[in-house]
Amino acid sequence: MDDATKTELEAAAFRRLVSHFRERSDVQNIDLMNLSGFCRNCLSRWYQEAANEKGLDMDKLEAREIIYGMPFNEWKSLHQTEATKEQQEAFKKSH
């Protein structure tokens, strides 16, 4: 496989992951962190870091809007719930 094809496939998989996260707004970031060690915020940070490494000026909120599909504060007000004690305890144990 050539590098261009590999990059296209990686980009397609990334777009599918982002789309899946947008569709599954019922899944909370803390649950993602507890199960996989990363969440939407991590993904947006990695996106921002990659943009910055390429010389693009992108801040945290811009990157989050790309991943969340809307301003982060709007997503939070629509979809984020308060973490339960169990979720918080699981987070502490896994980190």
Image: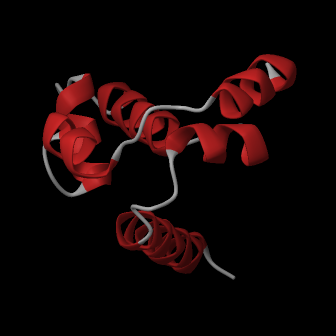
- 72 w.r.t. 70: above or below: above
Give percent across and percent down for residue 9. 54, 78
Looking at the picture, tell me which residue is in the foreground, 30 or 49: 30
- 5 w.r.t. 32: above or below: below
Q: Residue at x 31, y 26 (%)?
A: 52
Q: Residue at x 68, y 33 (%)?
A: 87
Q: What quarter of the picture does the C terminus occupy?
A: top right
Give percent across and percent down for residue 6. 59, 74
Q: Residue furthest front?
A: 85
Query: In screen coordinates, is 78 left or right of 15?
Result: left
Q: What quarter of the picture does the N terminus occupy?
A: bottom right
Looking at the picture, tell me which residue is in the foreground, 55 or 36: 36
Q: Residue at x 26, y 38 (%)?
A: 63
Q: Residue furthest right?
A: 93
Looking at the picture, tell me which residue is in the foreground, 56 or 36: 36
- 58 w.r.t. 79: above or below: above
Quadrant position of residue 73 = top left
Residue 56 in view of the camera: no
Query: In screen coordinates, is 84 left or right of 70?
Result: right
Give percent across and percent down for residue 61. 20, 29
Q: Residue at x 60, y 32 (%)?
A: 84
